[in-house]
Image (tube, rainbow, N blue to C red):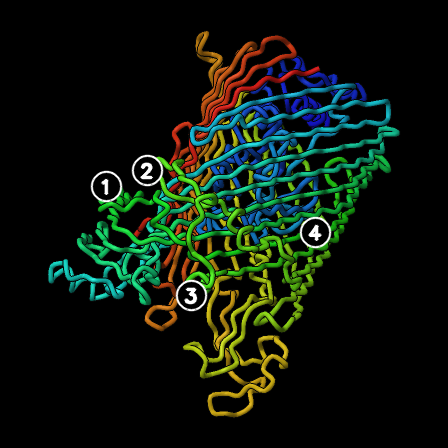
Amino acid sequence: MHTAFRQTSLALAVLSILGSLPKTAQAQESDPSAEAMEQIEVTGYRRSLIQAKDLKKDALGTQDTILAEDIADFPDLNLAESLQRVPGVTINREAGEGRQISLRGLNADFTQVQLNGMEALGTSSSSMDSRGSTNNSRSFDFNIFASELFNQIDVKKSYSADMDEGGIGGTVGLHTAKPFDYDGFRSAISAQAGDNANTNDTSPRIAALVSNTWDKFGALVSVAYSNRNTSEQGYNTYRWRPLDAQGSDISALSEADQAAVNSGDLRFSRGSRYSLFNSDQTRLGATLALQYRPNSDLSIGFDALYGKLDIDRDEYHLANNGSNSTALGCAGPDYDNGAGYVCSQLNDIEYNANNEVVYSSFSNTNIQSETRNQTADSEITQFVLNADWTVSSDLTLSALAGTMKSTYQDNSAKVYLESFGDETIDFTQDRFYGQNSYINGYSPTNIDEFRYHDIDLLANDIENTFDVAKIDADYALNSYSGLKVGMSYKKFEHSDNYLQTDNLLLDDWQSGAVSDVVNPDYVFVNNQHSQQAWLSTDVNSVLAAYGIDRNGDMVRTPNKVEEETKAAYVLYDLSLFLGDTELRANAGVRYYQTDITSAGLFNQTEYVTLESDYDGYLPTMNLAWYATDNLVLRASAGKNLTRPTLNNLAVGGSINTDPQAGASGLSISAGNTALQPFETVNMEAGVEYYFDEVGYVAVSYFRKDIENFISTTTTPTAYGETGYPLELIDGAVDADGNPQTADTLYDVYQPQNLQDSDFSGWEFSLQRDFDFLPAPFDKLGAIANYTYADGDSEHDVIVDGETTQIVRPFYGLSKNTYNLTVYYETDAWGARVSAAHRDKYITWVETSSVDEDESGFHGTTYWDFSAFYNVSENLKLSLEGVNLSDEREEQYSDSSNRLYNTSQSGRTFYIGATYTI
């Protein structure tokens, strides 16, 4: 019955990807057990909730599922935003839409993502360095894919030995549609047009699906295309720094204020800039599914998946660029008055009890216009061949072989214009949105105020590949127990190449060898920001005018990481009826062995290759007691792991072999190929009560004891113990003038496996139709979930030259998160409003920065809306609204909670129509 239900629910879900569904579920004719299945009379969104509820109930471990009806019809821009409705899932955003997920408080690096049964990695980027810029870890960027390509998402929070190891937080399975999910021919097409408050475009979205079956063979093709202009605007800093006067004239200040400035205790905002982050992003995805079923015992399938995200970004800033990027200090040269530099004058100042300068007035300060153009292209291709063979009534075999390739390339050019003027910087009105005023005749839109300053170029080239093979056998020992065994092989290869060239033409412009006069044909007045207009640059025109090729070949010396993992497992399944109750359980163990090879450049000259390996056993156990038809009690325990991030494993770095060069002396800064994976002991217990067809209520407690927590630290180490070849120190001497040997001590700055940590929390969820209310309120329903999670990690930081340990929350951990959806649905129309909230969370701990000890984001609550109207059985109209409150994304700097970055991406609305056959 469970198999029949799953097949039928998938058929209904796929049909709803792009449109409304028939009102009666139809079981596949080839499955006789489906005739006995209870018929589901409800339609649309309610039906998908019922199907997802039953999949959750039937799963042995803790699992949540989203089916195609609510993927297609939630007001979501991509897969990440669909996933944020799941209990325990939170997302971070890029350009106003979801990019990565955190699961139960653990950040994206701890969540394993699988596409059609095999592990996958998708790489994109952010225009903001403060958001991590290019993804060079194991986390999956969900914004590469449109949600319309998938018919089911499973979020598995419990671990079993027959699952691939790798997801301490959990495993997210993404599934595309299959032709035998349908009965015969099906097709659908959907089109939407949208508008965002910060842009002027139509944001077209088109999706289509065609599927057919011919007796023993079936084929399905789907495609999704969208183009969207985005604009984030706001105010940001480069963090805050304690400084003295730095050459500025402070004679206009009172003696007390002069003393405060000269003390070096005051913190000044760096950059203090208005910012615009614009992008034109095109998303294209396609799937192909072929299935062959010669008989009821054998099924062979082939899945192909393609995803592409192309982004053309234009970034604009009006910033301060004096000493340490503040408005203080001197800059220049001053070409009007001969050699020398222009020094600012500080006329007025206010600072608070934390010594933060919240108001300042300057004359002759350095003001820059920054314009950046970047192309960023992500692409994923995947091919998976799978087979299921029922050898006998007791034995079933299944196999999977697949390959996946993920690439990312970007190319960036930035042009700086320089000027000097009078301004005030004011944080007194809004601590997280500064107000700059340009005074005394200075105008940031006046071309005569500006000169060319310099040009920066940057390019990244990243490639990831997976090759996977699996085979599993399921043997029924008797009527109530069975044994599963399996083996798998996975080869993962990662390479990245990075090129950066800064300050092009700076010396030529400053010396006068090349004219620094701004050509009016290459600039324009940028008035897109709500607070201020300023002069911006046409980047490509400037590059062409000075003969700079931004697309020059990169030096092909990439960092590489290769992982080869072999695994095998054995799992015992048990299903017992105890009176009127049923007990289901499994217990097993998984063995894994991983070999790592990492290669990269040292000091940009020496290519180094290091190898390492590790292995281990992962025992697991899961219990589910169906105490009544409605009540399920669950418990699980076991071990799992998450492998170190790619940038931590990268061997490339730098070595200083001269004990007299720099304050660090003999030192090495690099990744660490010898890192052991994060390991965790997981424990969970939960209670679930299922209402008759209309929802459930559930509560669970979870705990994860994490070993081998990774943190970056400096450790005195004999060179011979680092693993690096002795050739790197050939000819070098120590502080006494003696030749360096394997015993020579080096300060090694790299990630290390340090202290253990623990992590725990509670999860509550409720899904309920209000069918007990009198009409018309009986068409109402609600979905609500809340997660509390708490966990700390230790970090080594340098304070006053001494290394000490500090405790901070896990990266990406929001202690409190919740989601709420209220819906109303009839056969003819329906509407939903949703809220998604997460508390503040930390993204980074600084080890030795004078600017900050940590950074992170304030809490947010996003509101979305969706409505539909069925014109006929085949035609449906829709209206969707995303980010209705135009939420501010506020990033803070330091535990003192100072402004780092504030931006808003605007409200987005879509209207659309779907037609199905």
User: Looking at the picture, which amino acid does disc 1 mark?
Assistant: Gln
Q: Residue 531 carries which label?
A: 2
User: Looking at the picture, which amino acid does disc 4 mark?
Assistant: Thr
- Disc 4 or 2, which lies upstream in sequence? 4
C-alpha separation, residue under disc 2 versus residue under disc 3: 36 Å
Camera-near label (4 vs 3) is 3
Residue 352: percent from left, percent from top: 20, 52
Disc 4 element: strand
Point 51% across, 23% down: residue: 910
Camera-near label (3 vs 1) is 3
C-alpha separation, residue under disc 4 versus residue under disc 2: 45 Å
* Residue, far right: 294
Residues at badges 4 and 3 in contact (C-beta under 8 Å)?
Answer: no
C-alpha separation, residue under disc 3 versus residue under disc 1: 42 Å
Q: Which mark is residue 511?
A: 3
Disc 2 element: loop
Residue indicated by mark 4: 465
Q: In this view, does 711 lie to the left or right of 245?
A: right
User: Looking at the picture, which amino acid does disc 3 mark?
Assistant: Ser
